[in-house]
Image (cartoon, coloured by chain):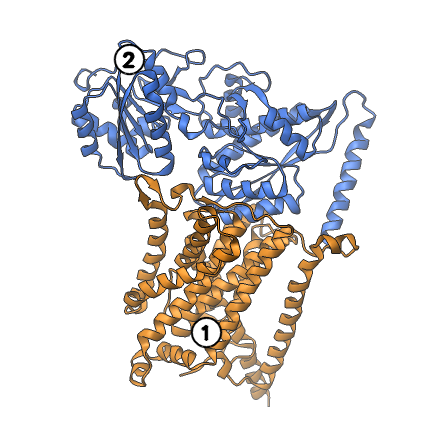
Chain colours: A blue, B orange
């Protein structure tokens, strides 16, 4: 007890010092530091993605502090993020979440990485009535619990391949049939079922074929696709399955006009392991470095990519994990500015009413707290490079269509 | 050598240590039971100082949970001598029993909770019969297999294309809507811990317990002496499963969200065994001491305790990793040097115990 109260005293002393130090400068004064908290799997199985998440948060923190802080009713509040390492364990994430709220008294919460940790932490945020914006859980279940304090900036899983369907409807000669392959895990099925339900409204017939999650021998499924002779072959699965399908498609000369995979092609591994066979493949992505939105604040896409290169030299282009994490911070920034207060309830209400355009796309939450307003972008691999091809207003090139037959590439 | 903790005849010095330990334990217990009450709104408004906040509750509740897990493991691993590596399966089954009944059938918690230990025990009895025919490494590996398999099955079972148990999404339980819900879960979990210790105490002084120890020391001899080894082993397995399942059931409602990752974590398997071993497998209070000590250590190293020390050789960002290393080292040191655990270290007869050291010092100096 004694140690905690002494810590509080020190904090109070520092704060009064900070306020006193700037009072004489005139203009906008500096307010109390706003602290965000985030437990991340900085060690353990989710280290890679968690580190990308942290990079996304830190990029914004650097930027906003260069501006002097978040402008709340004329007072600029500097920002700090308090991280803990949850060793990639959801149960440990819960303890640290409580620590952030109770002991560290953070003002707001940024999401952890991983759907189990996000779901657990959402329940804690709800019970403590502290707003949390998360950027790394696309499964909709978290948002179907009626929680009032959790918001997600991602497009939900059911949108993953919807962009490809929309794009296909604009192509000539118009494709009409889709053969949908899907792994049987929950996320993949959510993606696949959404296509099955949505595509008929755009004039497509859909055949759905499921396979065991994690399969790498998908010859039988690809042969079934060849027998159906579809215009479009889609896969909802993961990187290894996408690679296996592409290899089998070549082997069995499955010559469809369009190949689109939910997850996989956006990673460098896909191109590295398939070489030129990776060309022409489409995928749905939360964000790409090429998108052209018209952000109303913060950085543009190209400035963002530059800022990332500058802060993390040698890390390549920022991928969507980084961008969506930054977007979560942007949601908080705008909500705080709009609320003109750091009161958790007022900020929650401001988040619920938020509607802004950022480099990541539109951020606007539906009544459940999920960002259903941002479209997924469609990427295509052209000559070994990722390009954004849809929606047309954010695309950097036109789609290469139709995909030539395997023996004519 | 047929010897359980309660049959040891501590030396004079050992008795003093033990008395000190019990006194200390009593004080800690009293604090543990009384401190939470200060967080009641009535006491708050009456001006009582807040001794327990929400973080304290979470850590204390989790500690009590590990006391249950380690003590329940002790019934099989410590008393019967079967190194079970899959007890987390019972935790998960208990959690999913409660989770399904509450989130799908909308049962109230206190109706659903009694079924969690029943489901776990029934499952343990079922798999126990074939599993407990194996011994040594074979049993360890097979039980680990069961622990992993149950989680996979629960995640993947489908009926007409819909996952029966929530699939990889998991289950969301409604948030338990009472005031002071932290208090409720804390006392539930402490109650479960007390029940587990009580059950162990009863087993240790019953014919059943003697039978289990006989099996541990020499199974053939026990059979010859008329111990129905199969029935005894399965009963111990099911008893451990029931207690573990009870903790799982409480966990489900406490944590609100459960999925395979949450309630079948493989690291719990390792941790509960380590806690029992470090504290003293086969003893009554050993697993309790081990659970409290190790869980506090893990939390201290991960930086979530209100107390934190700034140690120059222990940078804070390296601590969570170090926790894993330290746990491994502890296991090594315990198994090699203090095979009967820290409980034995204070007052036991092991050659590495303090009592032995004092005894031999006294003898040599005379």
Q: Are marks 2 and 1 in contact (CB under 8 Å)?
A: no
Q: Say which residue appears at 33% left-offset and 14% top-offset.
A: A169
- Label 2's element? loop
Q: Say which residue appears at 59% left-offset and 90% top-offset.
A: B366
Residue B364, compared with residue B335, is above or below; it is below
Q: Say which residue appears at 80% left-offset and 31% top-offset.
A: A21
Residue A186, compared with residue A87, is above or below; it is above
Q: Say which residue appears at 82% left-offset and 32% top-offset.
A: A20
Q: Looking at the rendering, which quadrant does residue B62 occupy?
A: bottom right
- Label 1's element? loop
Horizontal relation, residue B264 to residue A86: left or right: left
Residue A199, compared with residue B161, is above or below; it is above
Can residue A224 be seen in this snapshot? Answer: yes
Q: Which residue is mark 1?
A: B282
Image x and y of residue A99, in percent:
62, 47
Circle count: 2
For the residues labelled 2 and 1, the Cα–Cα distance comes to 71 Å
Label disc, if present, on residue B154 of the rendered structure? none
Horizontal relation, residue A66 to residue A216: left or right: right
* Quadrant of the drawing holding the N terminus of chain A: bottom right
Image x and y of residue B219, in percent:
32, 78
Disc 2 residue crowd, few under 14, some 14–19, many 20+, Cα 10 Å: few
Image x and y of residue A152, in percent:
52, 31
Disc 1 residue crowd, few under 14, some 14–19, many 20+, Cα 10 Å: many
| Observer-nearest of A268 and A315 | A268
Q: Chain of mark 1?
A: B
Q: Which residue is mark 2?
A: A401
Image x and y of residue A46, in percent:
45, 41
Can residue A2 be seen in this snapshot? Answer: no
| Observer-nearest of B79 and A179 | A179
In this view, the residue farthest toward the right is A24
Horizontal relation, residue A398 to residue B305: left or right: left
């Amino acid at each position: 007890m004694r140690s905690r109260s002494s810590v509080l005293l020190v904090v109070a002393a520092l704060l009064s010092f900070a306020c006193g130090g700037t009072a004489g400068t005139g203009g906008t004064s500096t307010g109390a530091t706003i602290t965000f908290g985030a437990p991340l799997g900085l060690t353990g199985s989710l280290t890679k993605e968690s580190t990308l998440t942290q990079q996304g948060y830190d990029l914004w923190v650097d930027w906003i502090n260069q501006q002097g802080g978040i402008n709340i009713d004329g007072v600029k509040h500097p920002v700090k993020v308090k991280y803990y390492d949850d060793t990639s364990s959801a149960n440990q994430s819960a303890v640290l979440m409580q620590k952030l709220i109770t002991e560290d008294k953070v003002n707001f919460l940024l999401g952890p990485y991983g759907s189990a940790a996000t779901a657990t932490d959402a329940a804690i945020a709800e019970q403590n009535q502290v707003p949390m914006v998360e950027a790394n859980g696309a499964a909709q279940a978290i948002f179907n619990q009626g929680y009032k304090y959790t918001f997600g900036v991602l497009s939900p899983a059911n949108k993953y391949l919807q962009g490809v369907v929309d794009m296909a409807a604009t192509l000539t000669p118009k494709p009409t049939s889709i053969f949908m392959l899907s792994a049987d895990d929950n996320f993949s099925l959510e993606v696949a079922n959404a296509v099955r339900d949505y595509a008929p409204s755009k004039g497509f017939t859909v055949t759905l074929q499921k396979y065991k999650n994690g399969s790498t021998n998908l010859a039988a499924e690809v042969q079934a696709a060849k027998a159906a002779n579809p215009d479009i072959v889609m896969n909802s699965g993961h990187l290894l399955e996408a690679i296996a399908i592409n290899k089998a498609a070549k082997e069995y000369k499955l010559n469809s006009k369009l190949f689109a995979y939910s997850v996989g092609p956006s990673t460098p591994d896909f191109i590295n392991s398939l070489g030129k066979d990776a060309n022409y493949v489409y995928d749905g992505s939360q964000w790409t470095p090429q998108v052209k939105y018209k952000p109303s604040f913060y950085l543009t896409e190209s400035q963002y990519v530059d800022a990332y290169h500058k802060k993390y030299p040698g890390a390549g282009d920022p991928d969507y994990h980084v961008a969506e994490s930054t977007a979560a911070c942007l949601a908080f920034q705008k909500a705080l500015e709009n609320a003109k207060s750091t009161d958790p309830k007022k900020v929650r209400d401001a988040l619920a009413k938020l509607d802004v355009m950022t480099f990541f796309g539109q951020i606007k939450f539906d009544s459940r707290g999920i960002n259903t307003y941002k479209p997924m972008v469609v990427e295509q691999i052209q000559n070994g490079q990722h390009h954004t091809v849809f929606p047309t207003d954010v695309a950097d090139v036109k789609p290469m269509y139709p995909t030539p037959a395997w023996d004519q590439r | 050598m047929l010897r359980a903790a309660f049959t040891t005849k501590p030396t004079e010095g050992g008795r003093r240590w033990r008395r000190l330990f019990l006194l200390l334990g009593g004080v800690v217990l009293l604090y543990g039971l009384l401190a939470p009450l200060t967080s009641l709104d009535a006491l708050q408004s009456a001006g009582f100082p807040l001794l327990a906040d929400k973080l304290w509750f979470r850590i204390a509740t989790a500690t009590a949970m590990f006391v249950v897990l380690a003590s329940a493991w002790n019934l099989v691993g410590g008393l019967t001598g079967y190194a079970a590596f899959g007890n987390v399966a019972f935790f998960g089954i208990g959690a999913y029993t409660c989770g399904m009944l509450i989130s799908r059938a909308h049962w109230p918690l206190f109706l659903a909770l009694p079924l969690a230990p029943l489901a776990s025990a029934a499952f343990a009895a079922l798999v126990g019969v074939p599993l407990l025919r194996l011994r040594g490494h074979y049993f360890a590996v097979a039980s680990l297999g069961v622990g992993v398999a149950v989680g996979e099955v629960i995640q993947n079972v489908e009926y007409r294309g819909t996952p029966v148990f929530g699939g990889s999404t998991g289950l969301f339980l409604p948030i338990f809507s009472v005031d002071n819900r932290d208090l409720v879960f804390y006392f539930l979990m402490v109650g479960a811990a007390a029940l587990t210790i009580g059950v162990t105490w009863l087993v240790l002084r019953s014919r059943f317990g003697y039978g289990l120890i006989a099996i541990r020391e020499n199974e053939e001899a026990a059979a010859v002496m008329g111990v129905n080894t199969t029935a005894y082993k399965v009963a111990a397995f099911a008893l451990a499963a029931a207690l573990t399942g009870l903790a799982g059931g409480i966990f489900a409602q406490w944590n609100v969200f459960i999925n395979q990752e949450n309630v079948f974590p493989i690291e719990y398997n390792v941790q509960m065994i380590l806690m029992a071993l470090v504290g003293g497998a086969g003893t009554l209070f050993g697993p309790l001491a081990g659970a409290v000590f190790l869980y506090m250590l893990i939390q201290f190293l991960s930086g979530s305790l209100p107390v934190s020390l700034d140690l120059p050789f222990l940078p804070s960002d390296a601590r969570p990793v170090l926790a894993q290393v330290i746990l491994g080292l502890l296991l090594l040191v315990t198994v090699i040097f203090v095979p009967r655990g820290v409980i034995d270290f204070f007052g036991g007869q092991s050659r590495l115990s303090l009592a032995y050291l004092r005894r031999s010092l006294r003898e040599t100096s005379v």
